[in-house]
Image (cartoon, rainbow, N blue to C red):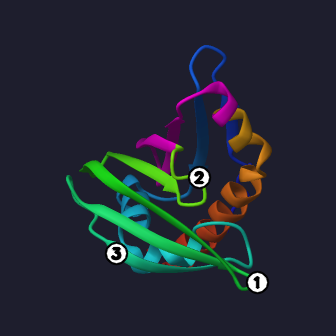
């Protein structure tokens, strides 16, 4: 497995958006599958020590999803709707059920860099700068980076 830098996480200064960029040794198709196949998704999403169970998963345009993450016996629910699912782009909503008014609009796209490498671009638009800054203060970078490291391992083992 090659060493890949941590995700770049940036806050837009003009719009309440968080942008994440991360390179993978994988094809766009593999990254798409890792984000839409629930059996794969639960194997890498979130920080180390988190166990995720899918309650509902319909990864198609117009579909929806819900999963529950368990950390040391504490459960946290998340849900959303898939607004657009294409092999090169996913648009979905994301709601942490502990903050039900905080719905984010997320867009992911997969940039083929050639030679079996892909750049993942993700952005989350939230309803205010306060919400955006709360996400950034939450320690989300740990979950993003540990999750993507698990995804690297899954990809290198041929599991996707």
Task: Report, in whole angstroms, how far the alpha carbon at label 3 lies from the one at label 2.
Answer: 20 Å
- Residue 67 lies, with reference to residue 120, above or below; the image says below
Mark 3 = which residue? 56
Asked whether, in this view, residue 32 is left or right of residue 41, the answer is left
- Between 23 and 132, the one nearer to me in the picture: 132
Give the residue at x 74% y 79%: 49
Viewer-side label of 2, 1: 2
**Horizontal and vertical percent for residue 80?**
39, 56
**Horizontal and vertical percent for residue 120?**
51, 45
- Residue 149 lies, with reference to residue 103, above or below; the image says below
Task: Report, in whole angstroms, how far the alpha carbon at label 2 lies from the one at label 1.
Answer: 20 Å
Indicate the secondary structure of the residue bearing disc 2: loop
Mark 1 = which residue? 72
Q: Residues within 10 Å of mark 3 (few under 14, many from 20)?
A: some
Where the N terminus falls, by quadrant?
A: bottom right
The span shown in magenta is 103-131
Indicate the secondary structure of the residue bearing disc 3: strand
Mark 2 = which residue? 99
Q: Residues within 10 Å of mark 2 (few under 14, many from 20)?
A: few
Give the residue at x 49% y 48%: 118
Indicate the secondary structure of the residue bearing disc 1: loop
Nearer-N-terminus badge (3/2):
3
Where the C terminus falls, by quadrant?
A: bottom left
Give the residue at x 42% y 80%: 39
CB within 8 Å, label 1 to label 3: no
**Horizontal and vertical percent for residue 93?**
40, 48
């Amino acid at each position: 497995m090659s060493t890949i830098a941590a995700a770049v996480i940036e806050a837009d200064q003009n719009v309440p958006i968080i942008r994440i960029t991360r390179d993978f040794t994988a094809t766009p198709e593999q990254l798409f599958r890792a984000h839409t196949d629930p059996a794969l998704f639960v194997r890498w999403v979130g920080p180390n020590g988190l166990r995720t169970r899918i309650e509902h998963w319909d990864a198609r345009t117009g579909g929806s999803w819900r999963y529950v993450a368990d950390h040391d016996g504490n459960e946290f629910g998340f849900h959303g709707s898939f607004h657009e699912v294409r092999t090169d782009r996913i648009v979905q909503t994301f709601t942490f059920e502990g903050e039900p008014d905080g719905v984010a609009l997320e867009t992911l796209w997969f940039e083929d860099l050639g030679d079996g490498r892909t750049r993942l671009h993700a952005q989350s638009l939230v309803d205010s700068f306060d919400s955006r800054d709360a996400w950034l203060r939450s320690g989300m970078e740990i979950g993003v980076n540990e999750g993507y490291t698990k995804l690297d391992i899954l990809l290198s083992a041929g599991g996707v």
